[in-house]
Image: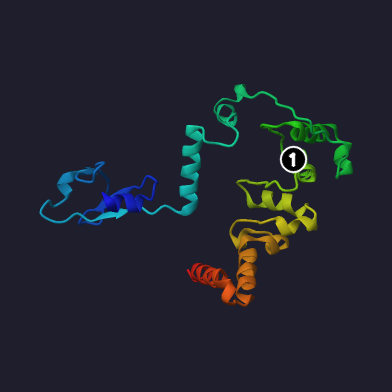
Amino acid sequence: RKYIEEVSNGFHSEFFAEYEDGNYALVEFSEVGDFLYIYGNPKEFDESKLVKVFVKEFPYPEIQQKRALADFRSGRITNAKLQPYILDSSNIESNKGKDIVSSFYNENLAKNKPQRESVENAIAEQDIFMIQGPPGTGKTTVIREIIKQHIERYRNDRILIVSQANVAIDNVLKGMPKELYKGMIRCGKEEKIDEELKEISFENKYNKYIEKINSKSGTAINIGLTKWKELINKGNSK
């Protein structure tokens, strides 16, 4: 039981056992760890021999996604209204705040009524606002304007931009002011990131951070710095 608790680390783990022929079967321990349930054909196992049980390793992003889904199901989210909104879009109700747009960064957008109204409504909305449009209608332009308008009002907020396509993320970021690059991180495979954005890639920023920390000289008062160097260099060597 102690072993199960250690490998689970507070999160549900999956286990599997190996047949002699190299095939695998999903297994599950009882709550106290005194029984092993085999999902499959138990006759494939030789009861006279020890059963090798392995822990299924999940990539960290997959674990984070599972935890996020678990939090969503239980309602442990920052904005409680998002759960009923996402499960049933008919529940969505507008919740306008006091933020209004008096001027636009993109002058051409200001002359385009659908784009202008999309930005105005998105900035005013406090809960959730969705924009739909076919290719070529200016969604990327609208996204950039919304980001700039939001940063203008809430400079310390963090903004997450996600898409199923790398190029969509790059198109948004390439249109942002260069002065914002210091606070931006482009995550993803290095080879999939546009050359213009390599300087803000996670790998590049991480490597520069390591170099900066290692360049600092430690003294007796900087015991914490020495320990931190050991930790980041250990992680960097994996």
Tell me which residue sits at (70%, 46%) in the image: 157
Rendering coords of residue 185 (x, y %): 66, 56
Rendering coords of residue 145 (x, y %): 79, 43
Q: Secondary structure at mark 1?
A: helix
Q: Quickly name the residue at label 1.
A: 139
Residue furthest toward the left? 48
Q: Is residue 236 above or below residue 162?
A: below
Q: How is the image coloured?
A: rainbow
Of residues 220 and 111, the one nearer the viewer is 220
Task: State the image quarter where residue 126 is shown.
Answer: top right
Of residues 109 and 237, the one nearer the viewer is 237
Q: Is residue 183 above or below residue 94?
A: below
Tell me which residue sits at (26%, 41%) in the image: 31
Q: Is residue 39 above or below residue 167?
A: above
Tag 1: amino acid: Lys
Specify few, some or many for label 1: CA neighbours under 10 Å numbering under 14, 14-19, or 20 or more: some
Instruction: Using residue 37 as the reference point, say whether residue 217 is left or right of it.
Output: right
